[in-house]
Amino acid sequence: MVANTRKLLREVSGGVHTLASSATELSAISTETATGVKSMSDKTSTVAAAAEEASANTTSVAAGMEQAATNLSSVASIAFH
């Protein structure tokens, strides 16, 4: 009976060691995942800022083109009168 108890305790100890090792690996993987998610979030923010700037620039160009069209229309109107 003592031999069986010792064997059982060794098996439990081995299982605890395996569990501790797995928890350590899982913690490392979680840290890597968190780092990757942070990096992706930073890149997404950069892309969003660039898209917003591109949109503002496009709006500015469109306003400039509209003003140019208005000016050309005025010049054409004067030239024909």
Image (cartoon, rainbow, N blue to C red):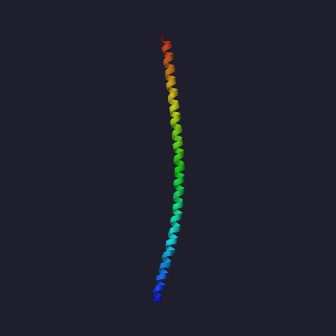
Residue name at image x 51 percent, y 68 percent: 23
**Residue at image point 54% right, 52% down:** 39
State the image coordinates of residue 43 (x, y, percent, origin top left).
Answer: 53, 48
Q: Is residue 36 above or below residue 62?
A: below
In the image shown, does 15 or 74 lie closer to the viewer? Answer: 15
Position in image of residue 64 (x %, y %): 52, 27
**Which residue: 52% across, 39% down?**
52
Screen quadrant of the N terminus:
bottom left
- Could you say where residue 69 lies in the image, as x and y percent from the top left? 49, 22
What residue appears at the point 48 percent right and 76 percent down from the top-left corner? Answer: 15
Residue that protrudes farthest toward the top in the picture: 81
Q: Is residue 56 above or below residue 27?
A: above
In the picture shown, does residue 56 fall above or below 28?
above
- The number of numbered badges drawn on the structure is 0
| 48, 73: nearer the viewer | 48
Return the x and y of residue 21 as percentages of the image width and height.
52, 71
